Image (cartoon, rainbow, N blue to C red):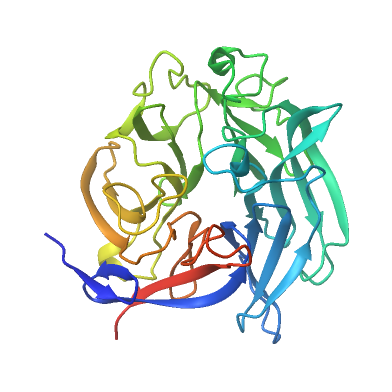
């Protein structure tokens, strides 16, 4: 049994430590690292989506700048669970440094999803935006466009079922409840399962997180179930993952008691050889809960073997403070594992100006 030790407001695996590396964010959701950071001082290290309409860039010195702002054309609120869960969520950065984000928007009195590509000459401020795909029906709540990942020269887009009509997840003509695959210019790749469709896989409910196992070149996603059956699944082209009939079809792991899995990533060399290629998954838990809770508010470590069997599962980080902070975005970067706490340790219910944070977990020397 792996022991967790108290480090401030967090419990962390023995032999590791945790530090707050950046603060001052407004509902920080996801993190995406630059693949090839520049040597120059003040150059971008990673980007962060803020739920209510911004993308921030963090430099190598952990200085925070605004990359893009005012990205929502509707007025968001703080109702969680509920309408406060929507906004700017997915985030990815390609090898050239172009930034991709997914978000909700309003058109003709209806809510829809889109994915936008942002280019910048220095990576610090958005110079140009290009809509890659839009018009995907949604509501002002969860189950919208979620994670974005890039593999080689393709963009993969996790799309929720939109909540109202889950049967759309089985409709090949509807983009909801799917994993989409597109070229980086938004066009449909000719080698998709259907060369005339973005759809790469179907039958998903609310696939919030995604990560690539680079050793096997495989995409894995987290998918939130209804009252039961959150899951992890390996995404294969043309496959059906069962929703709304089942959340277990083609899953490699299921939490019967829902834990709300969000972002996830495979470890590289940051934690040493013993942890390389282990999967780390953020479990958010309730939409807004203060203090320690029975489920969620933690990061778990998984070992997935070559046959997609989960051979090991254990808590790695768990919140032990008194506030609403919970693990949301997660990505491995220089020297460790970074994650967002969304609400921060104070939370907007106690202070409308309360800020969220980025934390870093690293091995002790």
Residue 236 at what x, y percent from top left? 47, 29
* Placement of the N terminus among the 4 image quadrants: bottom left
Q: Which residue is nearer to you in this view: 161 or 226?
A: 226
- In the image, 296: left or right of 203? left
Residue at the (38%, 68%) spot, across then down: 269
Q: Is residue 86 above or below residue 41?
A: above
Q: Is residue 231 above or below residue 137?
A: below
* Residue 278 visible here: no
Q: Which residue is nearer to you in this view: 316 or 80?
A: 80
* Placement of the C terminus among the 4 image quadrants: bottom left
Q: Residue 121 appears in which quarter of the rendering? A: bottom right
Give the tally of numbered discs.
Answer: 0
Q: Which residue is nearer to you in this view: 259 or 35?
A: 259
- In the image, 365: left or right of 361? left
Q: Is residue 295 above or below residue 30?
A: above
What is the residue that sits farthest to the front in this orientation?
A: 350
Residue 156 at what x, y percent from top left? 61, 39
Residue 266 at what x, y percent from top left? 41, 55
Q: Residue 191 appears in which quarter of the rendering? A: top right
Residue 112 at what x, y percent from top left? 74, 31
- In the image, 168: left or right of 125? left
């Amino acid at each position: 049994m792996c022991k967790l030790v108290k480090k401030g407001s967090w419990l962390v695996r023995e032999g590791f430590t945790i530090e707050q590396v950046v603060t001052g964010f407004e509902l920080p959701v996801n993190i995406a690292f630059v693949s090839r950071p520049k040597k120059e001082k003040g150059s971008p290290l990673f980007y962060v989506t803020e739920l209510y309409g911004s993308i921030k860039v963090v430099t190598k010195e952990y200085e925070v700048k605004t990359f893009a702002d005012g990205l929502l054309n509707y007025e968001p609120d703080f109702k969680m669970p509920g309408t406060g869960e929507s906004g700017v969520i997915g985030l990815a950065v390609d090898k050239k440094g172009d930034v991709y984000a997914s978000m909700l928007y309003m058109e003709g009195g209806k809510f829809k999803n889109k994915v936008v590509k942002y280019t910048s000459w220095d990576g610090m401020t958005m110079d140009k935006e290009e809509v890659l795909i839009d018009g995907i029906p949604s509501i002002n709540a969860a189950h919208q466009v979620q994670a974005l990942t890039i593999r080689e020269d393709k963009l993969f887009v996790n799309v929720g079922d939109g909540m109202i009509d889950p049967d759309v997840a089985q409709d090949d003509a509807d983009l909801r409840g799917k994993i989409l695959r597109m070229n980086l210019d938004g066009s449909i790749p000719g080698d998709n399962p259907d060369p005339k469709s973005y759809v790469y896989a179907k039958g998903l409910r609310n696939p919030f997180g995604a990560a690539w196992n680079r050793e096997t070149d495989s995409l894995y996603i987290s998918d939130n179930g209804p009252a039961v059956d959150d899951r992890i699944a390996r995404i294969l082209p043309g496959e059906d993952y069962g929703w709304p009939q089942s959340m277990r079809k083609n899953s490699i792991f299921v939490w019967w008691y829902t834990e709300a899995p969000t972002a996830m990533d495979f470890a590289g060399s940051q934690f040493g050889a013993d942890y390389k290629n282990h999967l780390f998954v953020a479990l958010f838990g309730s939409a807004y809960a203060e203090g320690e809770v029975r489920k969620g508010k933690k990061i778990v470590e998984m070992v997935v073997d070559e046959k997609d069997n989960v051979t090991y599962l254990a808590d790695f980080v768990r919140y032990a403070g008194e506030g609403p902070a919970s693990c949301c975005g997660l990505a491995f970067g220089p020297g460790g594992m970074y994650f967002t706490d969304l609400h921060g340790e104070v939370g907007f219910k106690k202070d409308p100006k309360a800020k969220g944070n980025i934390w870093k977990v690293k091995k002790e020397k």
